[in-house]
Image: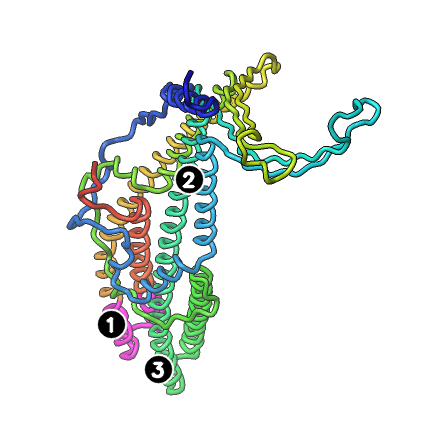
Amino acid sequence: MSLMPRPLRLTLLAAAMAALMGGCAPVGPDYQRPALDIPADFPQRSEGEAAALRADWWTLYGDATLNQLVSAAQSGSADIRLAAAQLEEARAALREVDAANYPQIDGTLADTESRVSTVTALPGANPIIRPNKRITASASFELDFWGRLRRSTEAARAAALSSRYGRDVVALTLAGTTAQTYFSLRAADAQIAVTRITLKARDESLEVARNRASSGVTSDLDVHQAVSARADAVLQLQDLERQRKVLEHQLGVLTGNLALRIEPGSLDQLPVPPVPPAGLPSALLERRPDVQVAEQNLVAAYARIGVAKAAMFPTISLTGTYGGESADFSNLLNMPARIWSAGFGLALPLFDAGRLSARTEQAQARQRQSVANYQKAVETAFRETADAISNLSATTASEAELKIKVDASRQALELARIRYQAGYSAYLEVLDAQRTANDAELALVRNRQSRLAYSVDLMKALGGGWTAQAQP
């Protein structure tokens, strides 16, 4: 006869069965990344010196104020705190699901008294009131023969990864929005500076027109035209100052500092970061956190099919109890007071009117939806990157032509002033030259803003940067 207690033998037998069952492949499909028809390279290659780019791409603009704003946004934004809390929730859910793969052990200490009927009790038998003290440790464990628990863990792990990448999506989007809003504010500063110069020039033109009208050289028509042109410049300046305040308020919300105030600065001093390598492989888009979110959601959808299918098979469980029972606490730990129980359970759904198969079909339909969402995410990433490269190349090429236009319009304005003061042309020619020069200056500023904004779009489209090591 074996010297090993029977409860211990049953425990070891259960552990051996659990190991055997755990070695069985879980039901349901294993995840395989869908094959998508995506070009290996982007259709338009960027021009310029290619360079690697680190994750904190905003520092390449060399602006201390921008660095502070992005840092404040990523630490003080409500969106970041929300994403971090969602990630903590997903990690806790993963630990909860993973715990189901291990036995659950509960301890119980009970002190009860019961009274039996005096009618049925035999004379001289046990007391009518019977005390009972019990201390037990019970364990229950489900044998994961069909892989339901393992598939549940896979789904929970994918959900946790999805939340993590979701936080990265928020951080990347927040950094991009902060940078683009800051560039818009700096563009407003530049346009305000241009408009103030224009206003000063129109004040001078108005003074000249008044002097010439008072001398009888010209009529009051020139004066009225100069007054109207000056009013246009004043209205333009007021609208630009309004836009700047709105942008400053938006940066205050993004950084969590509603009292934020930013001193005027220069847009021209901001460099455009390095362009990506020519023919950057489209597979690099796998670094985008939103694509990773879509893929992890797809992984979870695959695993949930296995969970739904496993529910259609028998559930096998082991239970056991070990402890002591006595009429008083002093005898609970004595050998005669020992009690134990061991059990084996099997539950099999016999008839459910198709409920479990319907759940499996739902899981399969959600998996197909996740495939479509993943494909859409990859295609969107490819399009956004290609668009950003095209837009950045176009604005880079336009900047040189706009500078030529600005220089020409300035010279034309100077000649128009000289001709008007000499009496060779009407004041209308000066007004046209002023409008052309002002529009050219503003167009150059807006193109510079667009070029910087498109560079941010490219950073976001590539998931925050690229390196030689990251290329597959």
**Residue under pointer 2:** 160
The residue labelled by disc 1 is: 415
Tell me the distance, in whole angstroms, between the alpha carbons under discs 1 and 3: 15 Å
Q: Nearer the viewer, residue 440 or 378?
A: 378
- Evaluate whether residue 364 shows in this view: no
* Main secondary-structure element of the magenta-colored stretch: helix
The image quadrant of residue 289 is top left
Q: Position of residue 285 (x, y in %)?
A: 29, 39
At 38% across and 46% down in the image, what residue appears? 169
Q: Earlier in the sequence, mark 1 or mark 3?
A: 3
Q: Are marks 1 and 3 in contact (CB under 8 Å)?
A: no
Determine whether the residue tagged by mark 1 lies in a helix, strand or loop. helix
Instruction: Measuring from the top left, give residue 51's x and y in whole percent.
Output: 17, 49
Question: Does the magenta run of residues contain 324?
Answer: no
For residue 156, say whether it is visible.
yes
Q: What amino acid is found at the position of numbered circle 2 in the picture? A: Ala
Spatial CA distance of label 3 from label 2 is: 72 Å
Give the quadrant of the C terminus. Answer: top left
| x and y percentages locating residue 279 in the rendered image | 19, 39
What separation in Å lies between label 1 and label 2 (alpha carbons)? 68 Å
State the residue in front, 127 or 247: 127
The disc labelled 1 sits on which kind of residue? Leu
Which residues make up the magenta segment? 410-438
| Residue that numbered label 3 is attached to | 208
For the N terminus, the image quarter is top left
- Check disc 2: other Cα within 10 Å, few if <14, some if 14-19, many if 20+: many
What residue is shown at x 21% (from left), y 57% (from top)? 400
